[in-house]
Image: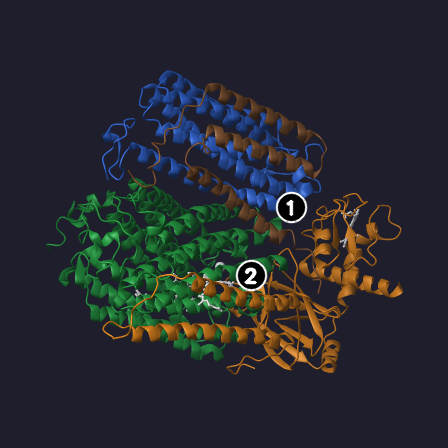
Chain colours: A brown, B orange, C green, D blue
Amino acid sequence: MSAAAAKSDGTRPVTPVSRYLWVLAALLTLLALTAGSALLKLGSLNTVLNLAISFAKTSLVMSIFMHSTQGRRLTFMVSLLGFIWLAILICFALSDFTTRAVIPAPW
Amino acid sequence: MSDFTWLLTQASSLAPEVDALFWFMVVLCGTVALGVICAIVYFSIRYRRGSDADRSGEPAQSLPVELTWTLIPGVLFTGVFIWSLFLFVKMHTPPADSQTIYIVAKQWMWKAQHPGGQREINTLHVPLGVPIRLTMTSQDVIHSFYVPAFRVKQDVLPGRYTQLWFMATKLGHYELFCAEYCGLDHSRMGGQIVVLRPSAFAQWLEGHAGPATLAAQGAALYRAHGCSGCHGANASIHAPDLNGLYGRPVHLANGTQVIADDRYIRDSILLPDQHVVAGYQALMPSFAGQLSEEDLLAIIAYLKARSESSHEHD
Amino acid sequence: MSTIEGSFWSHDYGLRAWLTTRDHKRIAILYALGITFYFFLGGAAATLIRLNLVEPTGALLSAENYNKAFTFHGVVMVWFFLIPSIPTTLGNFLLPLMIGARDVAFPRLNLASWYLYMLGGLFAVAALLAGGVDTGWTFYTPFSTMFSNTNVYLVVIGVFVTGFSSILTGVNFIVTIHTLRMPRLTWFRLPLFVWCMYAVSLVMVLATPVLAMTLALIALERLAHLGIFDPALGGDPLLFQHLFWFYSHPAVYIMILPAMGVVSEIIPCFVRRRIFGYRFMVYSILAITVIGFMVWGHHMFVAGQSMYASLLFSILSFVVAVPSAIKVFNWTATLRKGDISFEAPMLYALGFIGLFMLGGLTGLMLAAPALDIPLTDTYFVVAHFHYVMVGGSVMAYLGGIHYWWPKITGKLYSEGWARAAAILMFFGFNLTFFPQYILGYEGMPRRYHAYLPHFQVLNVLSSAGASILALAYLLPVAYLLWSLRAGRAAGNNPWQARGLEWQTTSPPPQENFLSAPTVGEAYAYDEAAP
Amino acid sequence: MTAATDAACAPDADVHEQYDDATQQREAATLGMWVFLSTEILFFGVLFASYTILRILYPQGFAAASRHTDMLLGTIETAVLLTSSSLIALAVRAVRLDQNRVAAWLLAATATLGLSFLVMHGFEYYKEYTEHLIPAIDFMQPGPHSHAIELFFCLYYCITGFHSLHVAIGVVVISALAVRVCRGAYGAHRYTYPELTALYWHLVDIVWVFVYPLLYLVDRSG
Ligand code: HEA
Ligand code: HEA
Ligand code: CUA
Ligand SMILES: [Cu+2]
């Protein structure tokens, strides 16, 4: 046995059907919530809310359907990698686009 | 001018300051490099195989040592960064009393327009000791305006204005290069900056005066394209008054506030719905494709002139 | 040919056996062939560049051909030579050996990566044959999308395909290191080379998709005038630059991290000491990997990027230099109280430290935006990156080839020739590229087909250096090939090195280890060999 | 390199030579898949990053453009994908419980939902074609925000096109998998491949979960 796989044989217990169905119900409710809230006039809050709901749906899918939180911790960390790096890309690029017009420096 | 000197000429007010940082870095990095190289050579000789140097008692790690050479470079780097920060901000901030000259780049030439309507190609005449601000744009691809003797460089982009400033401190002719790769004749897209005494510069301006000043050309375009029809005093359409607009903060319909600089005015003309002024309808049509980059610069110069005269009346 | 018998070389004969092999060692050899080919192809382009620049008027090539020459040089050297160089050859060969595994985790995927690499390379060569490309290796828009009428599609497809090869190699290595280590081979017992392979795989996996998609968008813009990067249609050319450098700055760490790994193996071996500050070496590898993703904007200081963003990227560029500093100091400290001998690999490694340091320090100057304004897009930058890439990575690559050559082939090369080549390379290199620092400071812009006469002296020096360099690169080809025929048998561990790869036979058998190797701490040069 | 010891493991014939045992092999494959999925996120990430930046440059234009998309179809498509995702999760569960027929049906249902997603997208594209909304093929939008709308639709087609490509690949792979599952190729001790396929499908779903509000719901109330 290798060092990395030493802990267990890696098989997780089988998730009950009801759990999957509950998640599906939750996902569809969240979908209804997004669609509904999009029709309300909330300004930029609309976008924030939409994205928050998207993240909620994502965590449901990742943790229950994809079992990202139930296996090894490594899997969980890897599952976040793409999102974190995408955040780096977007945030640093925005640091340029959102501060461009402000011209004179304060000193 | 094109003699080779080991020290590059310093012909602008920024040049000595940039050079100070540059040589400081050369000395700092040189010292560190020399130190490391000396250490390597010394160890290599002292501890070469077969030498009788004492080799006992050396640990393979040491936290204090590691922290020393983590923190010392860290502190030095921070210092250099702060120095460079102040200089960089200065290089980015034209003094308030700068004179503006407009530059339009295209494959593969530089076109300059002075406020008085004088135009030149691949040369730029500037007065000694006067801060000059260049407002630049490109008709096609990205170019870069580079004057080594002034230590200034700025990319020139299509669809956007970028700016750069310098104050020449030495008479003479200086090389102008295009520093961003722009296609076939990138290496020939050069020219000269001619620094003249202010009196000689004034003379030069007079000698090269065009039929009309840039602002006057702008005024003509302003009428010809029907801007005055909406923005004029007795227009039937509800459009903002453009007197005094240049350099003033503008409230936009989306709640933000911007300074009406060259770029803002350019965008207002080409992409009018990008920032709609608070309290107005997005009625203005886009003039993209109808006005060349030079026309736009002329209109901006005209609006700027109007603002300057209206500020005087305040 | 007794050493070859029973090794992976003789496991199976014939072209078919090689082209369908899943043995990581054979795949490494296949890669090495491709990579050497592309190095000399890129070198041929460099030869044209340097010949052309002997004369201020650039009489040898037309402006158009000159532009194609440096574009081809950059594209080939970056994507088809340097990025795959160490990971796919030394990495592929050694990674499983160093962790005591029988192969990488996904051998078939490994072979697929090689095919993708070759396919991508074919596209690049096809672009050359079809007349070349003239966008520069950076493909800046709108030039590359709307103005260039050369074979942008072919090159973009080539790089895109090779990108997948990188990604698959990265996935493979990450999984291999996580799951196939020997029992008791814990993370902090891994050789630094393995750590560097791990880090580099992460960068490949996280950065390369961005490049691939960005290049796909370039192709779409050309095809359908999308306008995302074209200001004439409302797009933003700086968006392209952000996306491109989000990949391409981390890519420079793809090039340097493996080199650092190689040097970290060579130095302890020829100094007979444990590497100084092992843990800090590991931490700095990880720091470079992560922070390296947050500095890309230092390529855009004069591009029209916001001043505030420039300052942010600038400070982070200084921060990312600190771990490199730690590494340089630790290598130097390893020499202290050692028992140093100067075989060829060690000469390369020492050359690496010096040249990488000079390149890195000038990188530091460029990271200060106030200095970057005059220096960017001049030969100062060209000198900077050749110091780190050629003086750094290529030196280390050659050092690694020499160090592991006996392991890979079972033969010893001529030590005298090898030292001569290393020294010649060092001097040729400095003569080629040091003058370029001065040229850059004097204001000579890069990518210039012709230049002002007063730059000529330095350019001639540089070209003279390049011819020495060319000779120095041809020498190893000769004596290494010769060693295959006439070299002495190397024995399993000619350098008395530690590390699991030295515990098997040279060359290793197809299944890597006939009996399980003994695991201990890395670089245990102060202990008796197992 | 000991031989497989775990009783729960598959016969050794299934284990490739570089692995000690089936568990290790399965962990390697799963980890590999997850790493690959991160690269997928970054592939799409380029498009999302471009979207973010252009939307910040042209907020009104993007709002106007988004109103040209079909919110009803978009919402149904989202529901379809979410449902298919839970079906494939159930399918993997069934494989693990050796319920091969159930699993095969669930997979078939998943593939069918995926297919219907593609068909709905086809309708959308056709509708947009008739409304002159397809850049480079037939784009004609009068009015103030024409450029921004065009950019929005460029991204819209890049994103949904690339996503539909993923869906299409998924449909093919899942259909093939359904057949093999039905033939009993997988079971309680051999479910790595179905599980990896499911991971892929979930990721395709997750991407859509972000595409939906970003493309269909910008300023619907305006
Ligand atoms: C292997 C590749 C490689 C590596 C490792 C690096 C490393 C670094 N690079 Fe370089 N770079 C390139 C390849 C590389 N670069 C390429 C290819 C380009 C040009 C692309 C193009 O435009 O075509 C480029 C361009 C480039 C630019 C843009 C120039 C321009 O176009 O204007 C900048 C600016 O910041 C920069 C900075 C740095 C820095 C800060 C590091 C740091 O990581 C360096 C860290 C190392 C050290 C600093 C040395 C060791 C340290 C010490 C000994 C410490 C002691 C020092 C003190 C206490 C002072 N690089
Ligand atoms: C790994 C990367 C790598 C490597 C190894 C090299 C190696 C070399 N490079 Fe490279 N270079 C780049 C990466 C690299 N370069 C990049 C990314 C650019 C930027 C491109 C751009 O601007 O877009 C660049 C640009 C660049 C320029 C600037 C061009 C310009 O801006 O106008 C120059 C100029 O001197 C140059 C020179 C050299 C030289 C002399 C070598 C030497 O080290 C090469 C020595 C090797 C040989 C000479 C091969 C020996 C073999 C033979 C001699 C056989 C030849 C066969 C025939 C002639 C049939 N390079
Ligand atoms: Cu214009 Cu280069
Ligand atoms: Cu960089």
D83 up-or-down from C328: above or below: above
Q: Amino acid at mark 1?
A: Ile
Of residues B77 and C464, the one nearer the viewer is B77
Residue C441 in the image: x percent, y percent? 51, 74
Chain of the residue under label 1 = D
Which residue is tagged 1?
D56
Estimate how packed mark 1 is, as few (under 14), some (14 to 19) or many (20 or more) residues with alpha carbons within 10 Å.
some
Q: Is mark 2 within 8 Å of ligand 1?
A: yes
Q: Residue at x 33, y 43 (%)?
A: C176
* Numbered label attached to residue C314: 2
Q: Quadrant of residue C394?
A: bottom left
Residue C246 in the image: x percent, y percent? 50, 52
Question: Hey, which residue is sitting farthest left in the picture?
Answer: C2
B260 up-or-down from B211: above or below: above
Q: Quadrant of ligand 2?
A: bottom left
Q: In this rendering, which labeled residue sits more in front, label 2 or label 1?
A: 2
Q: Secondary structure at mark 2?
A: helix
Relative placement, left or right, of C429 versus C513 is right
Whether residue B186 is visible to the viewer of this picture, yes or no, is no
C394 up-or-down from C89: above or below: below
Of residues C502 and C89, the one nearer the viewer is C502
Of residues C181 and B296, the one nearer the viewer is C181
Q: Amino acid at mark 2?
A: Ser
